Image (spheres, rainbow, N blue to C red):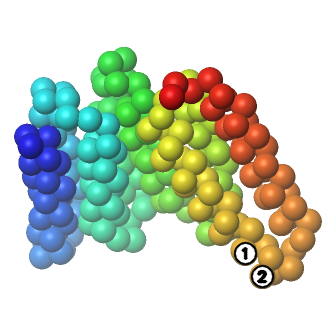
Amino acid sequence: MKGFALYGVAVLGGHLLYIASEYQFGAEWIFGLLTVGWFALFLQGWKRYRPGGSGLILVIAFLLLDINSIFFVQDLLAAVCSLLLGVLLVPFYRSYRDVALASGGFVLMNLLFHAEVESIITMWLFFIAAGVLSLVGFRQRFLWLAGCFSVLFAMAALLLLMNYLIEETYLIFLLVLAGAAIVVAGAYKFSRHLPD
Protein backbone atom coordinates (compact mmCIF):
# COMPACT_ATOMS: atom_id res chain seq x y z
CA MET A 1 0.00 0.00 0.00
CA LYS A 2 2.89 2.37 0.77
CA GLY A 3 4.31 1.78 -2.69
CA PHE A 4 0.99 2.57 -4.36
CA ALA A 5 0.69 5.80 -2.34
CA LEU A 6 4.28 6.72 -3.23
CA TYR A 7 3.57 6.30 -6.94
CA GLY A 8 0.32 8.20 -6.74
CA VAL A 9 1.90 11.15 -4.92
CA ALA A 10 4.82 11.23 -7.39
CA VAL A 11 2.55 11.27 -10.46
CA LEU A 12 0.08 13.73 -8.92
CA GLY A 13 2.87 16.08 -7.79
CA GLY A 14 4.43 16.11 -11.26
CA HIS A 15 1.07 16.85 -12.85
CA LEU A 16 0.37 19.67 -10.39
CA LEU A 17 3.73 21.22 -11.28
CA TYR A 18 2.74 21.10 -14.95
CA ILE A 19 -0.63 22.75 -14.20
CA ALA A 20 1.08 25.45 -12.13
CA SER A 21 3.53 26.14 -14.98
CA GLU A 22 0.63 27.06 -17.28
CA TYR A 23 -0.06 30.13 -15.11
CA GLN A 24 3.57 31.27 -14.90
CA PHE A 25 4.48 32.15 -18.48
CA GLY A 26 8.23 32.60 -18.89
CA ALA A 27 9.17 30.64 -15.77
CA GLU A 28 8.91 27.17 -17.28
CA TRP A 29 12.50 26.34 -16.40
CA ILE A 30 11.69 26.72 -12.69
CA PHE A 31 8.91 24.15 -12.96
CA GLY A 32 11.13 21.86 -15.02
CA LEU A 33 13.77 21.93 -12.29
CA LEU A 34 11.10 21.47 -9.62
CA THR A 35 9.94 18.37 -11.49
CA VAL A 36 13.51 17.05 -11.47
CA GLY A 37 13.71 17.74 -7.74
CA TRP A 38 10.36 16.04 -7.21
CA PHE A 39 11.72 12.94 -8.96
CA ALA A 40 14.82 13.02 -6.74
CA LEU A 41 12.56 13.00 -3.66
CA PHE A 42 10.52 10.15 -5.13
CA LEU A 43 13.70 8.12 -5.70
CA GLN A 44 14.61 8.43 -2.03
CA GLY A 45 11.21 7.09 -1.04
CA TRP A 46 11.37 4.38 -3.69
CA LYS A 47 14.78 3.26 -2.46
CA ARG A 48 13.50 3.10 1.10
CA TYR A 49 10.35 1.06 0.40
CA ARG A 50 11.55 -0.83 -2.72
CA PRO A 51 8.00 -1.48 -3.90
CA GLY A 52 8.91 -2.73 -7.40
CA GLY A 53 10.13 -1.88 -10.84
CA SER A 54 6.90 -1.10 -12.62
CA GLY A 55 6.25 1.91 -10.40
CA LEU A 56 9.58 3.55 -11.12
CA ILE A 57 9.12 3.08 -14.86
CA LEU A 58 5.57 4.42 -14.67
CA VAL A 59 6.58 7.46 -12.63
CA ILE A 60 9.47 8.41 -14.92
CA ALA A 61 7.22 8.01 -17.97
CA PHE A 62 4.61 10.35 -16.46
CA LEU A 63 7.21 12.89 -15.31
CA LEU A 64 8.76 12.92 -18.79
CA LEU A 65 5.30 13.66 -20.21
CA ASP A 66 4.92 16.49 -17.67
CA ILE A 67 8.31 17.92 -18.67
CA ASN A 68 7.31 17.73 -22.33
CA SER A 69 4.10 19.59 -21.50
CA ILE A 70 5.87 22.24 -19.41
CA PHE A 71 8.34 22.93 -22.23
CA PHE A 72 5.78 22.59 -25.00
CA VAL A 73 7.93 23.85 -27.90
CA GLN A 74 11.23 24.33 -26.08
CA ASP A 75 13.12 21.23 -27.11
CA LEU A 76 16.47 22.17 -25.57
CA LEU A 77 15.08 22.85 -22.08
CA ALA A 78 12.95 19.70 -22.20
CA ALA A 79 16.00 17.67 -23.22
CA VAL A 80 18.12 19.15 -20.40
CA CYS A 81 15.50 18.34 -17.75
CA SER A 82 15.01 14.86 -19.20
CA LEU A 83 18.75 14.29 -19.08
CA LEU A 84 18.80 15.38 -15.44
CA LEU A 85 16.15 12.75 -14.66
CA GLY A 86 18.43 10.18 -16.29
CA VAL A 87 21.43 11.35 -14.25
CA LEU A 88 19.42 10.83 -11.05
CA LEU A 89 19.03 7.16 -12.01
CA VAL A 90 22.79 6.51 -12.20
CA PRO A 91 23.30 5.70 -8.47
CA PHE A 92 20.54 3.08 -8.70
CA TYR A 93 22.18 1.17 -11.54
CA ARG A 94 24.33 -1.04 -9.33
CA SER A 95 21.47 -2.34 -7.18
CA TYR A 96 18.55 -2.11 -9.63
CA ARG A 97 20.08 -2.60 -13.05
CA ASP A 98 17.01 -3.78 -14.94
CA VAL A 99 14.66 -1.07 -13.72
CA ALA A 100 17.30 1.68 -13.90
CA LEU A 101 18.15 0.75 -17.50
CA ALA A 102 14.49 0.55 -18.52
CA SER A 103 13.82 3.96 -16.96
CA GLY A 104 16.98 5.34 -18.56
CA GLY A 105 15.76 3.95 -21.88
CA PHE A 106 12.62 6.07 -21.59
CA VAL A 107 14.83 9.09 -20.93
CA LEU A 108 16.81 8.25 -24.08
CA MET A 109 13.62 7.96 -26.12
CA ASN A 110 12.50 11.35 -24.82
CA LEU A 111 15.85 12.87 -25.80
CA LEU A 112 15.44 11.41 -29.30
CA PHE A 113 11.94 12.87 -29.43
CA HIS A 114 13.39 16.33 -28.78
CA ALA A 115 16.14 16.01 -31.38
CA GLU A 116 15.48 18.67 -33.98
CA VAL A 117 15.24 16.37 -36.99
CA GLU A 118 12.47 15.33 -39.35
CA SER A 119 9.76 13.10 -37.90
CA ILE A 120 10.69 10.14 -40.12
CA ILE A 121 14.28 10.31 -38.86
CA THR A 122 12.98 10.41 -35.29
CA MET A 123 10.92 7.31 -36.03
CA TRP A 124 14.01 5.54 -37.40
CA LEU A 125 15.95 6.53 -34.27
CA PHE A 126 13.13 5.11 -32.11
CA PHE A 127 13.15 1.92 -34.20
CA ILE A 128 16.91 1.42 -33.82
CA ALA A 129 17.15 2.45 -30.15
CA ALA A 130 14.16 0.34 -29.07
CA GLY A 131 15.49 -2.65 -31.01
CA VAL A 132 18.93 -2.39 -29.43
CA LEU A 133 17.52 -1.87 -25.93
CA SER A 134 15.16 -4.84 -26.25
CA LEU A 135 18.03 -7.06 -27.42
CA VAL A 136 20.18 -5.88 -24.51
CA GLY A 137 17.28 -6.71 -22.19
CA PHE A 138 16.96 -10.23 -23.59
CA ARG A 139 20.72 -10.78 -23.63
CA GLN A 140 21.24 -9.58 -20.04
CA ARG A 141 18.02 -11.23 -18.79
CA PHE A 142 16.51 -7.88 -17.81
CA LEU A 143 12.78 -8.56 -18.04
CA TRP A 144 11.61 -4.94 -17.63
CA LEU A 145 14.05 -3.65 -20.26
CA ALA A 146 13.19 -6.45 -22.69
CA GLY A 147 9.45 -6.13 -22.17
CA CYS A 148 9.13 -2.34 -22.38
CA PHE A 149 11.33 -1.91 -25.41
CA SER A 150 10.00 -4.91 -27.29
CA VAL A 151 6.61 -3.20 -27.21
CA LEU A 152 8.08 0.16 -28.28
CA PHE A 153 10.11 -1.55 -31.01
CA ALA A 154 7.00 -3.28 -32.36
CA MET A 155 5.11 0.04 -32.42
CA ALA A 156 7.96 1.85 -34.19
CA ALA A 157 8.32 -0.98 -36.71
CA LEU A 158 4.59 -0.99 -37.41
CA LEU A 159 4.52 2.79 -37.96
CA LEU A 160 7.53 2.65 -40.30
CA LEU A 161 6.05 -0.25 -42.24
CA MET A 162 2.72 1.53 -42.63
CA ASN A 163 4.46 4.75 -43.69
CA TYR A 164 6.54 3.09 -46.41
CA LEU A 165 3.63 0.94 -47.57
CA ILE A 166 1.45 4.04 -48.01
CA GLU A 167 4.28 5.85 -49.80
CA GLU A 168 4.84 2.73 -51.94
CA THR A 169 8.54 2.74 -51.11
CA TYR A 170 8.85 -1.03 -51.16
CA LEU A 171 12.64 -1.28 -50.94
CA ILE A 172 12.74 0.63 -47.65
CA PHE A 173 9.66 -1.32 -46.52
CA LEU A 174 11.69 -4.53 -46.99
CA LEU A 175 14.62 -2.97 -45.16
CA VAL A 176 12.42 -2.24 -42.13
CA LEU A 177 10.99 -5.75 -42.33
CA ALA A 178 14.50 -7.22 -42.40
CA GLY A 179 15.54 -5.11 -39.40
CA ALA A 180 12.47 -6.26 -37.49
CA ALA A 181 13.21 -9.89 -38.39
CA ILE A 182 16.79 -9.53 -37.11
CA VAL A 183 15.62 -8.13 -33.78
CA VAL A 184 12.93 -10.82 -33.41
CA ALA A 185 15.47 -13.55 -34.21
CA GLY A 186 17.93 -12.11 -31.70
CA ALA A 187 15.24 -11.80 -29.05
CA TYR A 188 14.20 -15.42 -29.66
CA LYS A 189 17.79 -16.62 -29.40
CA PHE A 190 18.42 -14.74 -26.16
CA SER A 191 14.99 -15.50 -24.64
CA ARG A 192 15.75 -19.21 -24.59
CA HIS A 193 18.08 -18.40 -21.69
CA LEU A 194 15.60 -16.29 -19.74
CA PRO A 195 14.36 -17.66 -16.41
CA ASP A 196 10.82 -19.09 -16.41
Instruction: Kindly identify which numbered label has been placed on residue 163.
Output: 1
In front of the other: 25 or 99: 99
Q: Residue at (81%, 58%) from the top-left corner?
A: 177
Q: Residue at (27%, 62%) from the top-left corner?
A: 66
Residue count near mark 1 (Cα–Cα under 10 Å), binned few <14, some 14–19, many ≥20: some
Instruction: Kindly identify which numbered label has been placed on residue 166.
Output: 2
Rendering quarter of residue 29:
bottom left
Q: Amino acid at mark 1?
A: Asn
Instruction: Kindly identify which numbered label has been placed on residue 129.
Output: none
In front of the other: 54 or 193: 193
Secondary structure, mark 2, is helix
Find out whether the residues at labels 1 and 2 contact each other: C-beta distance under 8 Å. Answer: yes
Q: CA distance from mark 1 to mark 2?
A: 5 Å
Q: Amino acid at mark 2?
A: Ile
The residue sitting at the right extreme is: 171
Q: Residue at (50%, 51%) from the top-left corner?
A: 109
Residue 80 at x, y percent in the picture:
37, 48
Residue 105 at x, y percent in the picture:
47, 42
Residue 113 at x, y percent in the picture:
50, 59
Secondary structure, mark 1, is helix
Residue 104 at x, y percent in the picture:
42, 39
In front of the other: 176 or 63: 176
Rendering quarter of residue 168:
bottom right
